[in-house]
Image (cartoon, rainbow, N blue to C red):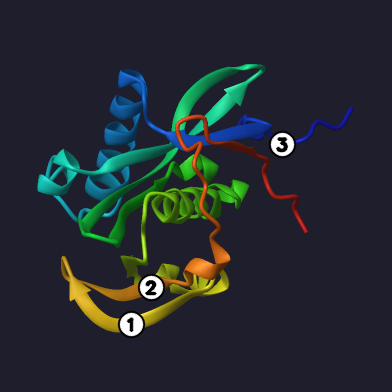
Amino acid sequence: MMFEPFRPFTAAEFRVKYATEAWEKRGAARLRRQVFCAEQGLFEGDDRDGIDDIATPIVALSLLGVAAGDVVGTVRIHEEAPGLWWGSRLAVAADHRSVGSLGPALIRLAVSSAHARGCTRFLAHVQSQNGLLFRRMRWRVVDEIELLGRPHLKMEADLSYYPPFVDAEAGFQTLPRKAA
């Protein structure tokens, strides 16, 4: 009898939404510490900064049946000046990166919800290795810089590709990408 190799469980669907519940916000903070502190070593202990005081956190939740399971992705957005919005701290849990749709879904909700809130320009500092993903999603490179000792791209979203989305508290569901 042949057995398939063990495959970690991955939810069949995900909800991407503003973090409105305390457990969602805690989950986003935990995931950011895991990715930016433990995995990447960019920060010691915690990556929280003053932007968190004004930012809107966005989460990707794994769905188990009809109930939300865990925070498996996050990003935050904030308005720096009237019409000028930034996205930052995009993170997807290591065991969900192969899903393929979570990063793009978080980016889509970040930009589209800011667009609905009056955004006329949306920027992000993107780690250089992630530049291709953003280019595919209609972002352009504005500048190349170094942040936290690593190469980053200052990038700008093409807002015409991101229609305003007003129901960000409820968000939307996304499915994993099919393997090619």
Judging by the rendered image, the residue that carries numbered circle 2 is 156
Dot 3 falls on a residue whose secondary structure is loop
Mark 3 and mark 1 in contact (Cβ < 8 Å)?
no
Is residue 92 rendered to the left or right of residue 178?
left
Dot 2 falls on a residue whose secondary structure is strand
Q: Amino acid at mark 2?
A: Glu
Q: Which of the 4 quarters of the picture holds residue 57?
A: top left
Q: Is residue 155 above or below residue 8?
A: below
Is residue 147 rendered to the left or right of residue 21?
left
Mark 1 and mark 2 in contact (Cβ < 8 Å)?
yes
* First along the sequence among labels 1 and 3: 3
Q: Nearer the viewer, residue 15 or 121?
A: 121
Q: Amino acid at mark 1?
A: Val
Q: Is residue 38 above or below residue 151?
A: above
- Badge number at residue 5: 3
Residue 118 seen from this side: yes
**Residue at 47% across, 35% down:** 17
**Residue at 66% across, 35% down:** 7
* First along the sequence among labels 3 and 2: 3
Q: Image quadrant for the C terminus?
A: bottom right
The span from disc 3 to disc 2 (Cα, nearest Å) is: 42 Å
Q: Is residue 144 above or below residue 28?
A: below
Q: Name the front one of labels 3 and 2.
A: 2
Q: Position of residue 101 (x, y in %)?
A: 60, 50
Dot 1 falls on a residue whose secondary structure is strand
* First along the sequence among labels 2 and 1: 1
Judging by the rendered image, the residue that carries numbered circle 1 is 142
